Structure formats: structure tokens, C-alpha cells
Amino acid sequence: MPDGASTLTSVSLDDKYTSTNGKIFLSGIQALVRLPMIQHVRDKTAGLNTAGFISGYRGSPLGGLMKTCGRPKRTWKRITCSLYRA
């Protein structure tokens, strides 16, 4: 490989929720979805068995939050979280 050439890295759409190092690019809503995931991992590392609760309502300024929360299903399952819609 010539000097200065970069190698291709395997990338997934779930990386924005699962990456633990390097830079990631998120929308504001995606960042809000990632926060409870990070908190869960921090709590588990500290030996705590905690839970989070995300609530909203239709027409809310953050109405897209619950929709976005439903997208990284494999990631939510990995950290043993459940999503319930009203």
C-alpha cells in the first residue's frame, strides 16, 4: 500500500450508538437517545442496577425522540432496555 493511503474501516449505522472511541457525528435527537445508553453502561460499571424512563407526548417538540429510540433495537437489547409506547 502506498505511503499515506488509508485502510477502509468497517462501519455500521449503529456506530453512533455503540462506538466508545473516536469521533461520531450525531443529530441532537440521536445524542438524546445515546445518553440513557451511556448512563446505563456507567451505572452497570459502578455496580448499580438502575433503570431509565423516557416519556413524551404526541406533538411534543421532542416528538421524534421516541421514533428515534425505536431505531437502534439491537443496541437497546444489548443493554437490556425495553421500549414501551403509550
Image (spheres, rainbow, N blue to C red):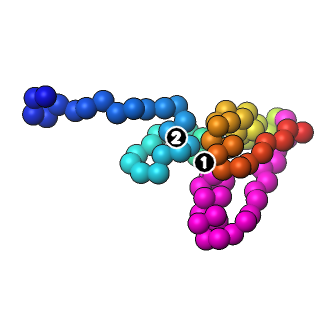
- Position above or below: 80 against 25: below
User: On the image, numbered disc 2 is attached to which residue?
Assistant: 16
Q: Please report the residue visible at 75 percent of the width from the left and 57 percent of the height from the top.
A: 52
Residue 5 located left or right of residue 40: left
- First along the sequence among labels 2 and 1: 2
- Percent coordinates x, y for residue 10 in the rendering: 39, 32
Residue 26 located left or right of residue 35: left
The stretch of residues the image draws in magenta is: 35-58
Question: Is residue 28 in sight in this rendering?
Answer: no
* Amino acid bearing label 1: Arg
Determine the CA span between mark 2 and mark 1.
Answer: 8 Å
Please give the label number shown on residue 9: none
Q: Is residue 18 magenta?
A: no
Question: Is residue 36 in sight in this rendering?
Answer: yes
Q: Please report the residue visible at 50 percent of the width from the left and 39 percent of the height from the top.
A: 15
Give the quadrant of the C terminus: top right
Q: Please report the residue visible at 79 percent of the width from the left and 54 percent of the height from the top.
A: 53
Task: Classify 10 Å Cα crowding around label 2: few (below 14), some (14-19), many (20 and above).
Answer: some
> Callout 2: helix, strand or loop?
helix
Q: Please report the residue visible at 41 percent of the width from the left and 51 percent of the height from the top.
A: 21
Task: Report the number of numbered marks.
Answer: 2
- Location of residue 70 by image quarter: top right
Please give the label number shown on residue 34: 1
Q: Residue furthest left?
A: 3
Q: Is residue 38 magenta?
A: yes
